[in-house]
Image: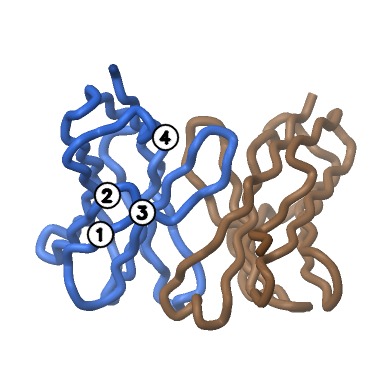
Chain colours: A blue, B brown
Amino acid sequence: AQSVTQLGSHVSVSEGALVLLRCNYSSSVPPYLFWYVQYPNQGLQLLLKYTTGATLVKGINGFEAEFKKSETSFHLTKPSAHMSDAAEYFCAVRNNAGNMLTFGGGTRLMVKP
Amino acid sequence: NAGVMQNPRHLVRRRGQEARLRCSPMKGHSHVYWYRQLPEEGLKFMVYLQKENIIDESGMPKERFSAEFPKEGPSILRIQQVVRGDSAAYFCASSSATGLNTGELFFGEGSRLTVL
């Protein structure tokens, strides 16, 4: 079965600083990986996804993530945090049957002025 | 171009009452998923449905919970005899058949159930 681990349930950075949110996965098949963002009292919005091809994927709002098979990781980064990036971020992996996503526990990003 | 629509957004029930949560998928989507988000926890898969069929309900509690996606109308998640532990945000997501190839889901804004 697939699983996702997000290290750090809370991450705090200063505005303008690098954002790094960690995600490790387990999958018995080549994974399809996703990052979603959830703003307060809203649903989840897709940030970016990796399916096949280039291992560095770019998403919306300046975020990107790199798929590293050897490390079973899919960490999310942004060079410079903005106050509007404060939200909860979820990493997810598609299951073997290809019909659902398994989510990590989420990381709440706080951005300090 | 409506997205996934969920209602009610907020629902308050007393212990023992029934809760019904509705989800209309995006236009053209025939695959619906329900996830539950407990306070300070991630999203847990509950059930996956296509029109008139339950495909996977491995995440549904064995008792009191049921889901349907009729030929006409929205998908319904029904919780009977609610208990305080049912208090959570319930998210619906939908996908097209093509979207399933990549696993991309489109989420509604959620229904927040509070059990008093």
Q: Is residue B64 visible?
A: no
**Label 4: element kind:** strand
Q: Position of residue B34 (x, y in %)?
A: 64, 57
Marks 3/1 same chain: yes
Q: Which label lies toward us, 2 or 4? A: 2
Which quadrant of the structure image shows residue B92? bottom right
Between discs 1 and 2, the one toward the N terminus:
1
Amino acid type of disc 1? Lys
Between discs 3 and 1, the one toward the N terminus:
3
Q: Is residue A89 visible?
A: yes
Chain ID at mark 3: A
Q: Disc 1 versus disc 4: distance between alpha carbons?
A: 19 Å
Q: Disc 3 versus disc 4: distance between alpha carbons?
A: 12 Å
What residue did someone put label 3 on? A35
**Label 3: element kind:** strand
Label at residue A63: 2
Q: Report the number of discs.
A: 4
Q: Disc 1 versus disc 2: distance between alpha carbons?
A: 6 Å
Amino acid type of disc 2? Phe
Marks 2/4 same chain: yes
**Label 2: element kind:** loop
Which quadrant of the structure image shows residue B53? bottom right
Between discs 2 and 3, the one toward the N terminus:
3
Chain ID at mark 4: A
Given contact means CB atoms under 8 Å apart, are the residues at marks 2 and 3 in contact?
A: yes
Given contact means CB atoms under 8 Å apart, are the residues at marks 1 and 2 in contact?
A: yes
What residue did someone put label 4 on? A87
Label at residue A58: 1
